[in-house]
Image (tube, coloured by chain):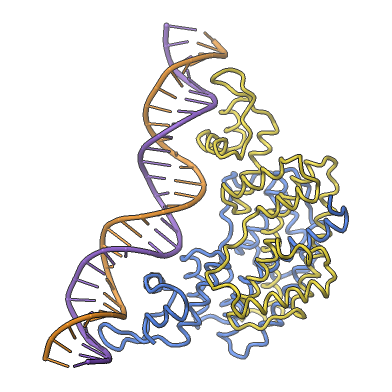
Chain colours: A yellow, B blue, C purple, D orange
Amino acid sequence: MRLSELSERSGVSTATIKYYLREGLLAPGRRISATTADYDEAHLRRLRLVRTLLQVGGLSVAAAGEVLRHVDDDSLGRTFRLGAALWALPHPPAPDAEEGDEAQVTARREVDLMLEELGWESARELAPVNPDHTSLVEAVASLIRLGYPWNAEMMTPYARMMHQVAVHDLDFVETYPSESERVEAAVAATILFEPILRAMHRIAQQEETVRRYGIT
Amino acid sequence: MRLSELSERSGVSTATIKYYLREGLLAPGRRISATTADYDEAHLRRLRLVRTLLQVGGLSVAAAGEVLRHVDDDSLGRTFRLGAALWALPHPPAPDAEEGDEAQVTARREVDLMLEELGWESARELAPVNPDHTSLVEAVASLIRLGYPWNAEMMTPYARMMHQVAVHDLDFVETYPSESERVEAAVAATILFEPILRAMHRIAQQEETVRRYGIT
DNA sequence: ACGTGTGGATAGCGCGACTTTCCAACAGGG
DNA sequence: CCCTGTTGGAAAGTCGCGCTATCCACACGT
């Protein structure tokens, strides 16, 4: 199919598709002549994934490019490929607070205690280089800075629940036969499950609030 | 304290504080003279909350203003005040897909089935006006559009887990004595727990991936 | 042969979050 | 009492980002 058809079928303007091509989010079509290229179903599928990453996942164009480059990198083993793709996902920028402040030190200690308690060995090993670990420490530090007490004992149940969620995720990913499909599924699942969990969390909070206090 | 001191203690530039004042994120100080105003600890506390909403929660300045206006609205009962504040939190913009498409219809049906199965009565009643319900339907529709099968049966366990999380949240919020502190705590908890849960989710996924497949 | 569509490049636009600049009116130390 | 520095307030400017528009020479289909 040609550019215009890809545009029609995806609902994305040709100008925007060209922009994505320029930014490397989408592989160029098979060149037919100097002025024509041919796109296939894989392009359409990838384009839909891109739109989802941008619109639902809220990724920047640059971040989506990073992620997709890892997804397409055949040179990595499964774990690294997935890890690399997930680590390229955006993380909230480290706040302007000077690092090493008291709240952060406390947060780091409690997070490490939590990992120990859970027996998450590989998470502990990877901690220094894992941006998600950094994010977690920062978020906990923010809570502490706002004056909310927070420690390993309180965190662990949440982490156990998220582990259950992760088990479900991977069971789901395993239903896909090919390696590349699985990595793509894992990325899509991570990105799309986040808004789903967020929405469920807020709905559950509202439900529970009403149960406890009624509508007042 | 004066503007410059507020700026120093919070690490936010005076220009930015002025900007927040203009946008209504921060109440004006008590006027001492035509050119001086006095700020207290409450302003500092609020300013820290604002920065947290913006940096950690990723809210826009406008959205943070919305949320805080509800937090400060004494005319509402507890449930409505909290609900109003939470509903003012940003929701991913509805994708450009024409509404009422097949994926969305399916998604809505499955979400409603899930709520029924869970016995979340008030969530079902509020569904038509609840932006979180809309977000959930949209996110599920996106999954379906990308070709991932998804139904009530698969969603329910996740929702149950998020309900457990919400129960923990509210137990935590209840530890605060005053009404306004509790509403503020609820907002802070909702905003700050989201990055925490997200980070825990990703760490758990990595841990579980390593457990299943090793480092390959 | 000619209108439409093509890849490719460059420039422009609108928005949001600040940041800068300017101002007149003070405050407070010497 | 004067002089330096700060204050609240307004307006304009900056910057990065995600597109969007314009232009071009050329080729495809009819």
Q: Nearer the viewer, residue A105 or B179?
A: A105
Quarter of the picture holding the N terminus of chain A: top right
Classify residue B165 by image quadrant.
bottom right
Vertical placement of residue B127 versus C3, above or below: below
Q: Is residue A69 left or right of residue B115?
A: left
Residue A76 in percent (x, y) is at 77, 44
Q: Say which residue appears at 69% left-offset and 62% top-offset.
A: A132
Q: Nearer the viewer, residue A33 or B61?
A: A33
Residue A198 in percent (x, y) is at 67, 63
Q: Is residue B162 left or right of residue B1?
A: right
Viewer can see residue B133: yes
Classify residue B203 by image quadrant.
bottom right
Classify residue A90 by image quadrant.
bottom right
Viewer can see residue B153: no
Q: Nearer the viewer, residue A31 or A215?
A: A31
What is the total number of numbered labels drawn onto the structure image? 0
Q: Say which residue appears at 58% left-offset and 17% top-offset.
A: A33
Residue B124 in percent (x, y) is at 70, 65
Quarter of the picture holding the C terminus of chain A: bottom right
Q: Say which residue appears at 55% left-offset and 19% top-offset.
A: A34
Q: Say which residue appears at 84% left-offset and 57% top-offset.
A: B210
Residue B189 in percent (x, y) is at 63, 75
Vertical placement of residue B211 versus B26, above or below: above
